Amino acid sequence: MKALVIVDLQNDFFENGALAVPESNSIIPVVNNIVDKFDTLIFTKDWHPAKHKSFATNHKDKKVFDLIKLNNIDQILWPVHCVQNSFGAEIHKDIKIPKTACFVTKGSDVEVDSYSGFFDNGKIHSTELNNVLKKKNISDVYFCGLATDFCVKYTVIDALALKYNSFLIADATKAVVSNNFNKSLNELVEKGAKIIYSKDL
Ligand code: VGL
Ligand code: ZN
């Protein structure tokens, strides 16, 4: 059985959003074309409290993209983004959301960020994602969304560690730092992921 995990297609990650990913709007039609090919769809949502410690504004004398240790874990400081129940946290209105889709939120603990849709960055808490996949007997998981070099990458790495056959749909994902795109794909291939294109689905 196969599933599609659609990572963080929220307003703040699209062009003009608070943490805009370059060329992100170009994946909208690509994603809309592939959702119909899956019976099981899971949307992840970055879902931060306003006081989240990954936000530069929640630290004195720090600026966006500074690197700090947050409870001993490397943390890049981000602009305020995907605050729970805000417009920026809503899935983009042009994304087709089938009625059967499930949603998994992450990043709600102010003390630890959560790039992966499976576990937070400290591997302290897990989300419902693995349970949802297990319950539906999923063996093959396809991934798309934002951003290739952060939330998509870490979600695929955890999927591989959990022994799912993991496929990244390369034309349905974009990186925060465009230069990181190929690097992220290579890293994922090295760990066992397969790179595919939406036309091959
Ligand atoms: C993301 C940085 C901070 C992502 C989320 O969705 O890739 N990146 N929060
Ligand atoms: Zn975030």
Image (cartoon, rainbow, N blue to C red):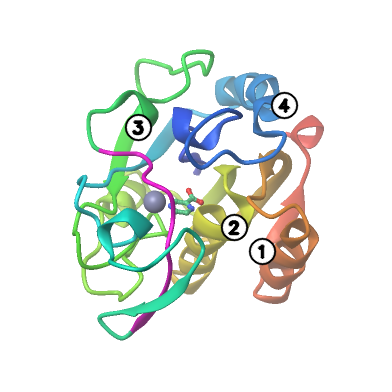
In this rendering, which labeled residue sits more in front, label 4 or label 1?
Answer: 4
Q: Is residue 6 above or below residue 166?
A: above
Q: Is residue 78 magenta?
A: yes
Q: Which numbered disc, 1 or 2, marks the residue that appears first in the sequence?
A: 2
Residue type indicated by callout 3: Ala
- The secondary structure type at the circle numbered 3 is helix
Estimate the spatial distance between the alpha carbons at disc 4 and disc 3, rounded to whole Å: 19 Å
Which corner quadrant of the image does residue 114 belong to?
A: bottom left
On the image, numbered disc 1 is attached to which residue? 193
Callout 3 crowding tier (Cα within 10 Å): few <14, some 14–19, many ≥20: many
Seen at 69% across and 64% down, the residue is: 184
Q: Nearer the viewer, residue 27 or 190?
A: 27
Looking at the rendered structure, which numbered label has been put on residue 89?
A: 3
Q: Residue at x 73, y 68 (%)?
A: 189
The spot of residue 74 in percent (x, y) is 42, 79
Instruction: Inspect the magenta stretch and tell me whether residue 159 lies in it.
Output: no
Amino acid residing under circle 1 = Ala
Q: Amino acid at mark 2?
A: Ser
Q: Which mark is residue 26?
A: 4
* Quadrant in which the C terminus is drawn: top right
Q: Which residue is the site of mark 2?
A: 166
Marks 1/2: CA distance?
A: 5 Å
The image quadrant of residue 107 is: bottom left
What amino acid does circle 4 point to?
Answer: Ser
Instruction: State which region is magenta.
Output: 73-83
For marks 1 and 3 on the same chain, the one whose residue lies earlier in the sequence: 3
Above-or-below relation of 94 to 181: above
Q: CA distance from mark 2 to mark 4?
A: 23 Å
In the image, is 41 to the left or to the right of 118? right
Name the residue at 73% across, 61% down.
Answer: 180
